[in-house]
Image: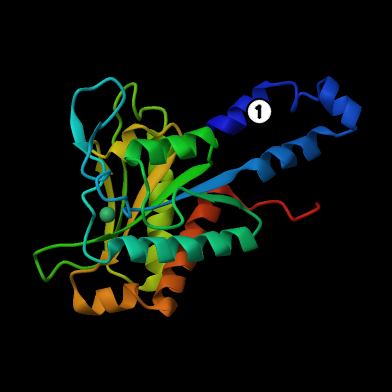
C-alpha cells in the first residue's frame, strides 16, 4: 500500500508532464498504478543448512534475536512451497503480479530478508504460507497470524494486515472447510517486524494430524487452499483491471 501512496504523491496521478506527454488521463493512470500492485508470496522454511540456525534480530534496532529458520514441522517446507506455487499460478491467471521469496529449497537468508524482498517490491501484500504442528494430537484446523502493533515496527502495517488476515482466514476456511482457529496477533515474528507492507501468515493446517497431513500433501486440497488464499488476496487488494483495459 505504501507503494501506491508514493506513486499517488508524485506527478504521475496528478497528470504531470510525463502523463501529458503520454496522453494518459487520470483514470488510466490510476489503473496503471493498480496493475503495478504486486503480491509477495513467502513459502515458509526451506532454508539452507547452516543458514537457518543463525540468529537475526526480531526487529529493527533490537538485540533480541531469533533463529532464522528452525525448519518448521516435518514436511512443512515442501507443503508451503507447493501451496505457494499453486496460489501464485491462480493469482497470475487472474492478472496479478506475483513474486515468491523462494522457489526451491536452500534459501540463503532469514525472515528479515524475506520481508525485505517484499518491501523492496512495494508489495500490496506479503502472504506467508506455513503449516502447523503440535504434540497435542487433538489440534487441527487453519489460522492466520497477523502482526501485533508495535510503534516503529508494525504500527504502520497493523490495521491493513489485520484486515487482510481476517479476509484471508475467512476465504481459506470457506474454500477448505477446515476448522476456523481464527486470526492471531503476534509480536515475536521476525518476518512481520521487518515488514513495511501489509503481512499475514497462514497456518494452513496441522501436519501432525494424519488426515490433515495427507490432505495438505495432496494436489486437490492444495488447490482448494490456494483458491481460498487467492480469494482472500482479491478481497483485500481488489480485482486487477482487465488486461489491456
Ligand atoms: Zn512454519
Residue in view at x 66 percent, y 28 percent: 7
Left or right relative to 239: residue 153: left
**Residue at disc 1, secondary structure:** helix
Instruction: Please state the horizontal and vertical placement of residue 176, each as a whole percent of the image.
Output: 38, 72
Relative height, residue 17 to residue 101 (above, below)? above
What residue is shown with label 1? 7
| Mark 1 burial class by Cα count in 10 Å: few <14, some 14-19, many 20+ | some
Which of the 4 image quadrants contains residue 94?
Answer: bottom right
Residue in view at x 37 percent, y 34 percent: 158
Q: Nearer the viewer, residue 99 or 49?
A: 49
Instruction: Please state the horizontal and vertical placement of residue 154, each as a whole percent of the image.
Output: 35, 30
Relative height, residue 222 to residue 157 (above, below)? below
Q: Nearer the viewer, residue 139 or 83?
A: 83
> Which quadrant does ligand 1 occupy?
bottom left
Instruction: Please state the horizontal and vertical placement of residue 244, each as a whole percent of the image.
Output: 81, 53
- Give the quarter of the figure containing the N terminus: top right
Left or right relative to 179: residue 95: right
The image's colouring method is: rainbow
Left or right relative to 131: residue 37: right
Amino acid at each position: 500500500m505504501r507503494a501506491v501512496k508514493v506513486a499517488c504523491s508524485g506527478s504521475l496521478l496528478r497528470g504531470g508532464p510525463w502523463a501529458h506527454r503520454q496522453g494518459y488521463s487520470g483514470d488510466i493512470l490510476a489503473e496503471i498504478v493498480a496493475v503495478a500492485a504486486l503480491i509477495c508470496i513467502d513459502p515458509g522454511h526451506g532454508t539452507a543448512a547452516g543458514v537457518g540456525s543463525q540468529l537475526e534480530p526480531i526487529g529493527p534496532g533490537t538485540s533480541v534475536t531469533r533463529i532464522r529458520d528452525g525448519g518448521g514441522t516435518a514436511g512443512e517446507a515442501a507443503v508451503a512451497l507447493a501451496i505457494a506455487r499453486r496460489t501464485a499460478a491462480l493469482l497470475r491467471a487472474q492478472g496479478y503480479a506475483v513474486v515468491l521469496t523462494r522457489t526451491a529449497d536452500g534459501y540463503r537468508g532469514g525472515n528479515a530478508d524475506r520481508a525485505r524482498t517484499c518491501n523492496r517490491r512495494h508489495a500490496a501484500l506479503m502472504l506467508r504460507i506455513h503449516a502447523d504442528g503440535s504434540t497435542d494430537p487433538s489440534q487441527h484446523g487453519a489460522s492466520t497470524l497477523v502482526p501485533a502493533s508495535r510503534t516503529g515496527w508494525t504500527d504502520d502495517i497493523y490495521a491493513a494486515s489485520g484486515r487482510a488476515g481476517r479476509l484471508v482466514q475467512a476465504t481459506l476456511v470457506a474454500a477448505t472447510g477446515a476448522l476456523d482457529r481464527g486470526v492471531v496477533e503476534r509480536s515475536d515474528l521476525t518476518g512481520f517486524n521487518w515488514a513495511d507492507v501489509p503481512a499475514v501468515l497462514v497456518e494452513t493446517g496441522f501436519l501432525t494430524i494424519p488426515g490433515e497431513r495427507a490432505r495438505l500433501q495432496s494436489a486437490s486440497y492444495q488447490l482448494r487452499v490456494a483458491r481460498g488464499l487467492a480469494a482472500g488476496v482479491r478481497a483485500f487488494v481488489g480485482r486487477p483491471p482487465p488486461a489491456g483495459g
